[in-house]
Image (cartoon, helix red, strand yellow):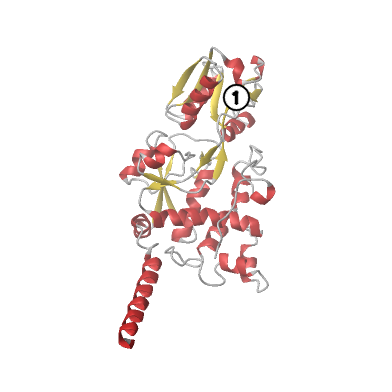
Amino acid sequence: MKSFIKKLMLIAGAATVLASASAQAAGPNSPTLQRIKARGSLVCPVPTSPYLGFFEVGSNGSWHGLDIDICKSVATAILGPNPKVNFSAVSWADRFPALQSGSIDLIAMFTSWTRSRDSKLGFQFSNPYLFAGVRLMVPAALNVKSAKQLDGATICAVAGSTGDRQLVNYLRAINVKYKMLTFENFTDVVSAYKNKRCDALSAAGPGLAVLRAGELKTPEQVILPDVVSMEPISVAVRQGDDAFLDVVNWTFAALIEAQRLGITQANVDAKRSDPNSSAEVKYLLGASPGVGEGLGLSDAWAYDVIKQVGNYSEIYARNLGDKSPYKLPPGPNTLWTQGGLLYSPTFD
């Protein structure tokens, strides 16, 4: 009997070791993660024309914007400081086939997390990195105060977007008859609006605010109070690669947790080396071991990300907020402790 119990204990111990080893290997066994590491670069999509605040091209030809920083964050977590990111130009409609084909590693391209995309197209979605609702903008000269006054109007929108479908449902619900004029890319949508081919422009609220502060500053524009939707903007990855999705999700979590803990791009080195830093700061930044465990990442991954791009509030501020040309308040894109929707899972 004692011999039998001893054998059971040995079997249980072996099972525990195997389970632990399997958990440790979960990150490295990700097909996408392996390809990125072998290639030495992350392949991210960019639209065929700029989308202000999210995808812009600088004077030196390099891309910058909020979604560019999201790609750089993930790349840094996987590849370390100053990672190589290859940007592949795709149309908004082609971003999903590009991910399905494997020509890009993920979609960080102002993409809404929806049921059909999640369940029918073979994708998985990350936790949201931005909350943005579809709104309508009209010239102030029209003296329109709400969408109910758009009966008979022509509305410009991007073809195939979730905002397009949600707007249709919204206008139907308030009994407004309209004509929809759609285009393949947002640049053509804006051009049509500027040339008065439509009476209203439909897009995500951040996009409209960026336009109103810049390209469409004059004549005066009004963003109507109607909130057509509140959409979670997330990263899409291929279905079944849970370990890669974990890396994406914990990268976002690190950006938010760094903001909560007061860790910035400027002070991250000091926070990491300070013996008086809290245990949670030391753990997040890899000064104490374990934060890379099970993800296939080094313990310095979160430190590298914050050093490279800053915390979440820094990313938002320089691309859309008070340090950008657009001065768009973060609204729901603030910490839950400040009345926003952002929170991080527990780093344990």
Residue 17 in the image: x percent, y percent? Answer: 37, 75
Q: Amino acid at mark 1?
A: Met
Q: Residues within 10 Å of mark 1 (few under 14, many from 20)?
A: many
Residue 52 in the image: x percent, y percent? Answer: 55, 36
- In the rendered structure, the answer to whether residue 121 lies left or right of residue 330 reads left
Residue 192 in the image: x percent, y percent? Answer: 50, 20
Q: Residue furthest top?
A: 152
Q: Please say whether residue 310 is visible from this viewpoint.
A: no
- In the rendered structure, the answer to whether residue 3 lies left or right of residue 220 reads left
Image position of 342 with respect to 298: above or below:
above
The C terminus - image quarter: bottom right
Q: Please say whether residue 177 is visible from this viewpoint.
A: yes
- SS type, badge 1: strand
The N terminus - image quarter: bottom left
Image position of 136 with respect to 314: above or below:
above
Nearest to the observer: residue 25 or residue 196:
25
Nearest to the observer: residue 272 or residue 250:
250
Which residue: 44% across, 62% down?
Answer: 295
Which residue: 54% across, 16% down?
Answer: 175
- In the rendered structure, the answer to whether residue 254 lies left or right of residue 183 reads right
Which residue: 45% across, 22% down?
Answer: 182
Which residue: 53% across, 21% down?
Answer: 173
Residue 59 in the image: x percent, y percent? Answer: 53, 41
Count of marks placed on residues? 1
Q: Quadrant of residue 31?
A: bottom left
Q: Residue furthest bottom?
A: 2
Q: Which residue is mark 1?
A: 137
Image position of 5 with respect to 124: above or below:
below
